Image: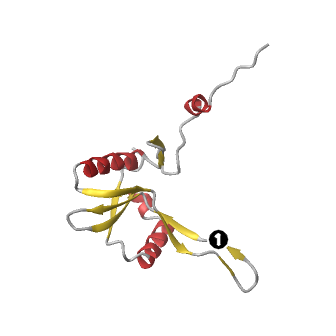
Amino acid sequence: MTRATITPEEYRAMAKPTRNKYNARKVHADGYTFDSQDEYRRYKELLILQAAGEIKDLYVHPRYPLQPAFIDNDGTRYRSIHYTADFLYRHIPTARWIVEDVKSEATAKSEAFRIRWRLFRRMHRSVWGFIMQYGKGGK
C-alpha cells in the first residue's frame, strides 16, 4: 500500500481561510501576507502610484521599535515592543515619508492600537504623515 503525499502548497489550498476577530481574511500575494483584503487593495493602489511616479521607495510592513527590551530591578525580563505599520513610502510632490495603516473603524478604536499609535508618533517624529485608511471591516 502506498501513502499519498501532498505538497505544502496543496495543503495550504485545502486549509480553511483564516479569519481574525473582525472577520477579515488574510491575503497572500507577492511574498507578503496582508491582514485583510482592504490592505491588499491598498497595496495594489500604491503599486500603481509608484509606477506613475507619484510615490517611491514603497516598503511593506515596516517595523518600528517603541521600547527596547529591559530587565527591571527585580530581575524580570520584558520584551521589546514594536509597531508594524502596513506601508511606508516617500511622497514625491512633498518629499515626505508617509506611513499608512489600513484599519477598520473598530480596530482603529481599540485601546491597544491607540496606545501603539501614540507611542509611534512620539518616538518617530521624522515620519511626516500618518494616514489612516478605514477599511470595510471584513465585508
- The residue positioned 45% from the left and 57% from the top of the image is 61
Residue 134 falls in image quadrant: bottom left
Q: Tag 1: residue type?
A: Arg
Colouring? secondary structure
Percent x, y of residue 40: 39, 46
Relative to 97, residue 29 above or below = above
Depth check: give the residue in front, 80 or 104.
80
Classify residue 46 as left or right of residue 14. Answer: left
Mark 1 surroundings: few (<14), some (14-19) or many (≥20) residues within 10 A:
few
- The residue positioned 64% from the left and 71% from the top of the image is 79
Classify residue 30 as left or right of residue 66. Answer: left
Question: Residue beneath label 1, please?
Answer: 79
Relative to 93, residue 75 above or below = below
Residue 101 falls in image quadrant: bottom left
What quarter of the picture does the C terminus occupy? top left
Percent x, y of residue 138: 42, 46
Depth check: give the residue in front, 58 or 128.
58
Relative to 39, residue 28 above or below = above
Q: Seen from this angle, which residue lies furthest bottom?
A: 73
